[in-house]
Amino acid sequence: MAVRSIVPNLPARDPAALALFYQQVFGLDVVHDMGWITFLGGPAQASARLQLATQGGSDTPLPAASILVDDLDAALQNLRALGHAPVYGPVTEAWGIRRFFLRDPDGNLINVAAHSDHTSDPSDA
């Protein structure tokens, strides 16, 4: 199992309005907008991304970060081997991503996701 990306998620009352602020200050582009979440990225750097959201999707709490992996089952197995269980999922969401949430030992909520085709934009986590 390999990590494909890690993206922070910032809470936002109005993701599109907050995105405008980050666009104006840092020159980021809106890569994708689903209403409840807006994905920002830098045109020259695929690794420069920020997600602004009202929720975590499917009416879940907003995770502190999204970690995209190439093998969700392996990540789930590793989590369970440590004696932990997911707090949400695993589930395939309506927008086509398979994911689960975990709480790390300090209580941070983390979204762990994988694309079924491994070719989709990693910002969709």
Image: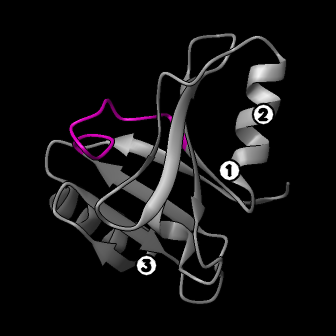
Between residues 15 and 2, which one lies in front from this camera angle? Answer: 2
Identify which residue is drawn at 78% across, 33% down.
77
Whole-number angstrom distance, CA of label 1 to CA of label 3: 33 Å
Between residues 84 and 10, which one lies in front from this camera angle? Answer: 84
* Mark 1 element type: helix
The x and y percentages for residue 58 are 24, 44
The x and y percentages for residue 107 are 57, 12
Magenta segment, which residues?
54-65
Report which quarter residue 117 is drawn in. Answer: bottom right
Nearer the observer, disc 1 or disc 3?
1
Q: Which residue is mark 1?
A: 72
Judge from the rendering whether residue 2 lies leftward or rightward of residue 114; answer left or right.
right
The x and y percentages for residue 38 are 30, 64
Whole-number angstrom distance, CA of label 2 to CA of label 1: 9 Å
What's under tag 2, amino acid-wise? Gln
Examine the rendered structure and indicate whether residue 22 appears above or below residue 110: below
What's under tag 1, amino acid-wise? Leu
Between residues 81 and 44, which one lies in front from this camera angle? Answer: 81
Q: Which residue is mark 2?
A: 77
Mark 3 or mark 2: which comes first in sequence? 3
What's under tag 3, amino acid-wise? Gly
Q: Which residue is mark 3?
A: 27
Report which quarter residue 51 is drawn in. Answer: bottom left
Give the main secondary structure of the magenta stretch. loop
Examine the rendered structure and indicate whether residue 89 appears above or below residue 32: above
The x and y percentages for residue 44 are 63, 89
Identify which residue is drawn at 74% across, 63% down.
70
For the residue carrying disc 3, how many other residues have a C-alpha within 10 Å: few (<14), some (14-19), or many (20+)? some
Mark 2 or mark 1: which comes first in sequence? 1
Q: Is residue 56 magenta?
A: yes
* Mark 2 element type: helix
